[in-house]
Image (tube, grey):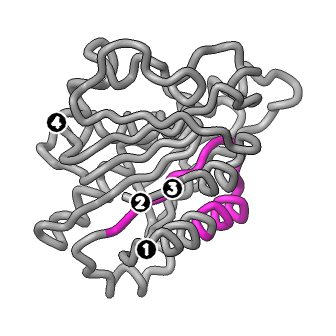
Amino acid sequence: MLTRGCYNLHTGARLECKGYRLYPRGYFEDLQSPEIAVMIHGMQNDPSDALEKFRIAKRRLRALGYRHPVVGYSYDSDVRGLLLDWRRALRAARVIARGNGAHLARFITDYCREVPGARVRLLAHSLGSELVLAAAGRLARRGVRVESIHMFGASAPADSPGPRGSGPVLSRAVRGRVVNYYAPTDAVLMAAGEQPLGLVGCKGRAFRGYVQRRVRPRDHRFKSYAEVMGSYP
């Protein structure tokens, strides 16, 4: 599943786009599973990088005993100008990620309509956490729920699971748990000069379904976080 080509990679401005596209199309036409997991990658992933993240997710979930289909969500995260002005590039990437929340929410809504009673689980790495939270807002307004959300090295604000953040939305959009794998040693998140959820965890009160797990991955890559994931879901 992809929305590539929907945003300007320099500014984050939205281009002409009709929403998400399914690939390979025949796979989705036959997919009627009562449960699926959707992997959302982070920043600076081109199409081939995104595909590798999905393969990593699928291998790790299979190793942990998860037998339902794993679907990848690929979006315009490979913004330009990171070396010239990383702050501007990060702003553009965030605009793109949050805008893609509408596309992901539409896919989930469509899938649940196509397969009544379907359970959809989300996995999000780094910037993908901001995309997922944006999607949760849309789903909550539509009365659609996902089964769970797992976040790894999340760049979303530390108060996201709380009452002043996305906590109220998550309580309506998630049937089960939101699991946050955070790492105080994550050098990439530290370099951003912020205190995101993936670096410090949630310090205040969070909604009832929130769980956080302190881990020590080798680095910020999704592969490293996947290696320290001990169970799923």
Residue with the mark numbered 4: 172
Q: Amino acid at mark 1?
A: Gly
Residue 69 lies, in percent from the top left, at 40, 75
Q: Residues within 10 Å of mark 1 (few under 14, many from 20)?
A: few
Q: Are marks 3 and 2 in contact (CB under 8 Å)?
A: no
Asked which secondary structure carries label 4, the reply is: helix
Residue with the mark numbered 3: 230
Q: Are marks 1 and 2 in contact (CB under 8 Å)?
A: yes
**Marks 2 and 4, the one that precedes in the sequence:** 4
Side of 139 where 96 appears, left or right: right
Residue 190 in the image: above or below residue 25: above
**Marks 1 and 3, the one that precedes in the sequence:** 1
Side of 27 where 105 appears, left or right: left
Residue 111 lies, in percent from the top left, at 25, 66
Residues drawn in magenta:
36-55
Q: Amino acid at mark 4?
A: Arg
Q: CA distance from mark 1 to mark 2?
A: 8 Å
Q: Quadrant of residue 140?
A: top left
